[in-house]
Image: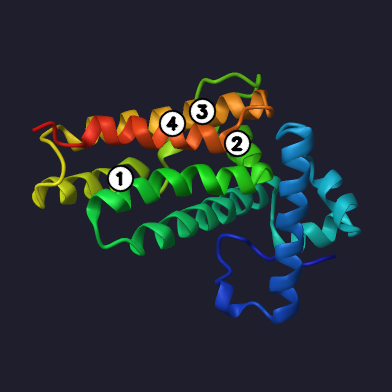
Amino acid sequence: MTPHRSADSTAPDSLTFTERARRQQLIECTIDLISTRGYPATSLSAIAKEAGLSKAAVLYHFSSKDNLTQATLEYVLERFSTYVTERVERESDPRAAVVAYVRAMIGYQQANRRHVRVITEMLLDDNGGTRLKTPGSHDTGGRWQSLAALLSRGQLTGQLREFDPRTVALAIGGAIDGVIAHWLAHPELDLDAAADELEVFTLNAIDRRD
């Protein structure tokens, strides 16, 4: 009988190089399948076939579909977050950091359409709608809190007008999500031009008016 390695109890540092490589392969296969077939149609058998492995081999590394798909979502979100954070932290000026945030949010999703599909497939309802399975679940990792902190810093320096950082952070995030959702359904949308407009939208919302 093939032993099962629990995805929840296995620390990454305890894995061998081969095990880490195999887990990464399975995550990449899961990304491919979810982004093309959708989450419901991505079964363990389909993932095993895509990876050229037996189902038992997949279960050795991830004890269930839920564990594998959750690891896949966490991988995508971590890469997304790292990309945005790196670009924001390059800017010492708070106002420029907010612009970098908006640009990075659009830039990553433009370059990683498969990852966006994974996020939307796993966080939205199973009927392909726009309702979140769990309200607020799109804010994994404290997304609005990070932007609100940037906005608050800009207010403290006197660069930005007085407003409620949480409300404005949610509004900016919602605008970004709306543009990306439209782009996913209508890939002919000029996302570079949309990013320009989102930058103007954001600055109009936060800049001082005196």
Q: Secondary structure at mark 2?
A: helix
Q: Which residue is mark 2?
A: 122
Q: Secondary structure at mark 1?
A: helix
Numbered badge on residue 179: 3
Neighbor class of circle 2 (other Cα within 10 Å; few <14, some 14-19, many 20+) is many
Q: Position of residue 16 (x, y in %)?
A: 69, 81
Q: Which residue is mark 4?
A: 197
Colour scheme in use? rainbow
First in sequence: mark 3 vs mark 4: 3
Q: Position of residue 9 (x, y in %)?
A: 55, 65
Q: Spatial distance from mark 3 to mark 1, Cα to Cα?
A: 18 Å
- In the picture provided, is 54 more to the left or to the right than 30? right
- In the picture provided, is 157 more to the left or to the right than 117? left
Q: Spatial distance from mark 3 to mark 2, Cα to Cα?
A: 19 Å
Q: Residue at x 36, y 33 (%)?
A: 200
Q: Spatial distance from mark 2 to mark 1, Cα to Cα?
A: 23 Å
- In the picture provided, is 188 more to the left or to the right than 110? right
Q: Residue furthest front?
A: 210
Question: Mark 3 against mark 4, which lies toward the viewer?
Answer: 4
Q: Spatial distance from mark 1 to mark 4, Cα to Cα?
A: 18 Å
Neighbor class of circle 4 (other Cα within 10 Å; few <14, some 14-19, many 20+) is few
First in sequence: mark 2 vs mark 1: 2
Q: Which residue is mark 1?
A: 147
